[in-house]
Amino acid sequence: MKAYKKKTASIQSHYDWSFTAEARVRFQHIKDNTYTVNYDANSFSVDFPFSDQASVHNIASCITTLLALGIDTAYIQDKITQLYRVEMRLQVKNGLQQCTLIDDSYSSDYQSLKIALDFLEQQKTHPQKTVILSDILQSGFSDEILYQKVGTLLQNNNINRIIGIGPNISFYLKHLQHFEGFHSTLDFLNHFDLKKFKDETILIKGARSYAFEQIVSELEEKTHETVLEINLNAISHNFNFYKSKLLPETKTMVMVKAFGYGNGSYEIAKLLAFHKVDYLGVAFADEGVALRKSGIKSAIIVMNPENSAFSTMISYQLEPEIYSLPELKTFLTEAKKHSLYEYPIHIKLNTGMNRLGFNDTHFEELIAILESTNSVKVASIFSHLATSDMPEERKFTLQQIKLFQKWSSYLTDQLRIKPIRHILNTSGIFNFPEYQMEMVRLGIGLYGVGNSEQEMKNCKMSLL
């Protein structure tokens, strides 16, 4: 482990912490997962790697302890970001028969049950919610009061199927609707038909002595192909790293096209929605439809919309990139069929990437069409940088940015609109943060792939 500098400090005085009340160590939430730590006459910021309440409070206690021990703040800032979840604690896994498993088989107590049920609601991929719960061995309550509280908690969370494992829970909760009890884990595995689980999200939470990892093993999806594991904590770390380069008001768009560059698009989109990303970007309409069907409600831009998919996109509230006059006219025809009013579209300008996009020879007709309709509104104007990752092509990149500023200003002035403007990609965020405008687009950098040694040093690979 890296050595740290220890300050001369006395631990005789009292250290306490709070997020709201006066305390020696006070935590203030700034944005996303960033907190300011104020203690005595000092202040510093820390990026928390987790966002659930229990983890945030644990980290606050950890930081307070480190400060009491006189640990250097730079060491604290570095090491806190490297924390990772304990195995079998709220791990989301693919289950058999289209089920989603939440593996929390590490411990079972009343307070952590409340946290796990909140996590279940946040992560559910199906309307049907199931809880497999063991006897709770640590509570401080009598069994009668404890299981009365547990029963109320399960009912208030609208759990559709409750499976209790252990003599106490089987006795005290037998009156609950949709409850089925078993004396032991082995009893459950021997007598319950696991094929009954289908299209549901299952929280598996048990005390260590019940060895619920056996249940997880039976329910987890099996495959003999190569498995690609994604470290969502690394993705959060990378997102926060690039976010730290931005002004607080700058919006973020994150690309999950090509099904998350080979990663699980739904899980990543769910994480990004939690981080309050402003837009998600997908390559094709079917990818956006899949996210909508999984419950993703974030704004989604389709970067390669096909004319034949326009009706489907409208049905699922997917927003098209518009890069040519024929495409715009086709979308307007579809918009009128659906009686749309100010449906958001995103105008792409070709400033040098030379794939697709409008240039100044198209502007007069583009402006005339947009001024003659209220079926659509220009939500954003953007362009792609061709060489933002190449230091030797810095001059060309700056020419692209300058041209984009000129063209986008002309369009916004003529149309009398104030859309979002964005041109920076992952390398653009790192190398040209002064041109972030109203929004940036984060792509492969989210997954720990940078284009410079310094960039890679600060990012974590999300592929395990």
Image (spheres, grey):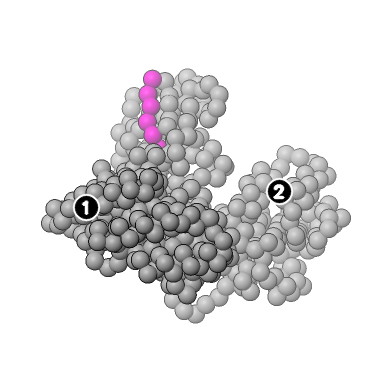
Residue at x 51% of width, y 28% of height = 17
Separation (CA) of disc 2 from disc 1: 66 Å
For this view, does 7 lie left or right of residue 290? left
Which residue, given by chain and number where applicable, does mark 1 sit on?
Answer: 403
| Marker disc for residue 44 | none
**x and y percentages locating residue 312 in the rendered image:** 53, 69
Q: Quadrant of residue 191?
A: bottom right
Identify which residue, 40 or 394, lies in the foreground.
Answer: 394
Whether residue 18 is visible, yes or no, is: yes
Helix, strand or loop for disc 1 = helix
**x and y percentages locating residue 269 in the rendered image:** 49, 58
Q: In the image, is residue 155 above or below residue 464?
A: above
Whether 44 is among the magenta residues is yes
Q: Quadrant of residue 189?
A: bottom right
Identify which residue, 355 or 455, lies in the foreground.
Answer: 355
Whether 1 is among the magenta residues is no
Q: Quadrant of residue 163?
A: bottom right
Which residue, given by chain and number where applicable, does mark 2 sit on?
Answer: 137
Residue at x 83% of width, y 52% of height = 172
Within 10 angstroms of label 2, few (less than 14), some, or many (20 or more) residues? some
Within 10 angstroms of label 1, few (less than 14), some, or many (20 or more) residues? some
Q: Over which residues does the magenta segment extend?
A: 41-46
Label whose residue precedes the other's in the sequence (2 or 1): 2
